[in-house]
Image: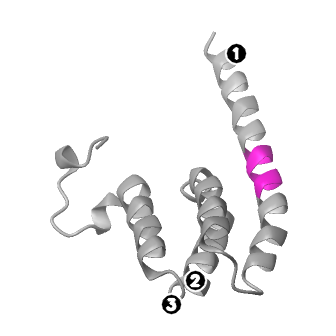
Amino acid sequence: MKEEFEKEMHGLAQQLKGLHDIAVAVYTPLVDDICSRVAPMKDVEWLLDYMFGFAGDDERMLLLYKRVCRHYWEVYPEMIAWHIMEYRKEYDPESLPGYKEEEIQDD
């Protein structure tokens, strides 16, 4: 029973890694494109929103996410600050001032 469970979990982990590999392959050219110009704010928001779910679990996606944020920081500072804060609340709450685990729940 335990071996079967471990085998199933390993298979799921491999599928998840495959999904992340696909996400990196899909989003890399999108990030390259959007960082080669000044895109409309809605396009930047859309890209960051879709990347958000992957950014907390995959270092490669986090680097792409950060690249977009850095490129647009001076162009759309309020929107980028909001996305950074959402990232921190979801994936890095310890970095927030006054962090207490019981206080950071689904708002």
In the rendered image, residue 96, in percent from the top left (x then y), is placed at 26, 67
Choose the circle earlier in sequence order: 3 or 1: 1
For the residues labelled 1 and 2, the Cα–Cα distance comes to: 47 Å
Element class at badge 1: helix
| Disc 3 target residue | 74
CB atoms of marks 1 and 2 within 8 Å: no
| Disc 2 target residue | 72
In this picture, which residue range is highlighted in magenta? 17-23
Question: Main structural element of the magenta stretch: helix, strand or loop?
Answer: helix
Q: Is residue 19 magenta?
A: yes
Amino acid at the residue labelled 3: Glu
Residue at 58 percent across and 53 percent down: it is 57
Residue at 71 percent across and 41 percent down: it is 16
Between tags 3 and 1, which lies in front?
Answer: 3
Amino acid at the residue labelled 1: Glu
Residue at 58 percent across and 56 percent down: it is 49
Amino acid at the residue labelled 2: Tyr
| Disc 1 target residue | 4
Choose the circle earlier in sequence order: 1 or 2: 1
In which quadrant is the C terminus drawn?
Answer: top left
The crowding category of the residue bearing disc 1, from other C-alpha atoms within 10 Å (few below 14, some 14 to 19, many at least 20), is few
